[in-house]
Image (spheres, rainbow, N blue to C red):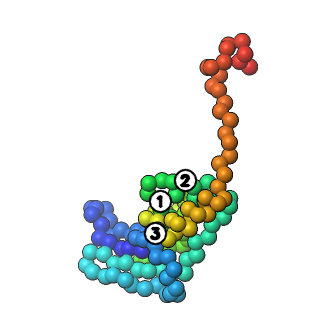
Amino acid sequence: MQRRRARSPWADIVWEPHGVVPGYGGDERKLLVQHDVAAQWLHPGFKLELHRDEIEGYYENVVTADPRVFVLWRMEGDDALPVEVTVSRDEAARWLDAGHSVDGVPMPPEIYAWVGEYVEKNYRPEPRKRIKPRSFQHPKDRV
């Protein structure tokens, strides 16, 4: 998570996820950078899991030009803390619809390769039958 000085007359600081670090094995929050403009903390212990019922959201994410890892986060006192991570665009949208703070960060290549392989092995788009609009039907055939 990153805290930086805001460029706004309405707020002094802005909190935002800054990135994800795959494979970090620590167990305590760690201050990485601190200077007068910004500070960054590493919050370890998050496990990214893939679920078959989210496969459409993973697919939508890996085929985009800008794949993301989505971070759900909350303010606790004066600190912003990450709560959960996902690579499903659908799950992130549900979190946003529920009123949570969610931001996307660039997906690291290792995660992209892992998710891409999962999608390639498991995603089978459902065939969709096109329904012709009523305007294309003859008036006597419209019910």
Q: Answer yes or no: is residue 80 visible.
A: no
Of callouts 2 and 3, the N-terminal one: 2
Q: CA distance from mark 1 to mark 2?
A: 9 Å
Q: Are marks 2 and 3 in contact (CB under 8 Å)?
A: no
Helix, strand or loop at mark 2: helix
Q: Answer yes or no: is residue 112 visible.
A: yes
Q: For mark 1, what is the residue?
A: 67
**Which numbered dot is residue 108?**
3
Residue at the spot x=71%, y=18% of the render?
142
Q: Give the class, few, some or many, for how many residues have Cα within 10 Å of label 3's Cα (few <14, many ≥20).
A: some
| Relative depth, front residue between 125 and 82 | 125
Q: Are marks 3 and 1 in contact (CB under 8 Å)?
A: no
Expressed as whole percent of the image width and height from the top left, the position of residue 87 reads: 54, 63
Above/below status of 48 relative to 92: below
Above/below status of 55 relative to 84: above
Residue at the spot x=25%, y=78% of the render?
36
Of callouts 1 and 2, the N-terminal one: 2
Taking the image as shown, residue 5 lies to the left or right of residue 66, namely: left
Q: For mark 2, what is the residue?
A: 60
Of callouts 3 and 1, the N-terminal one: 1
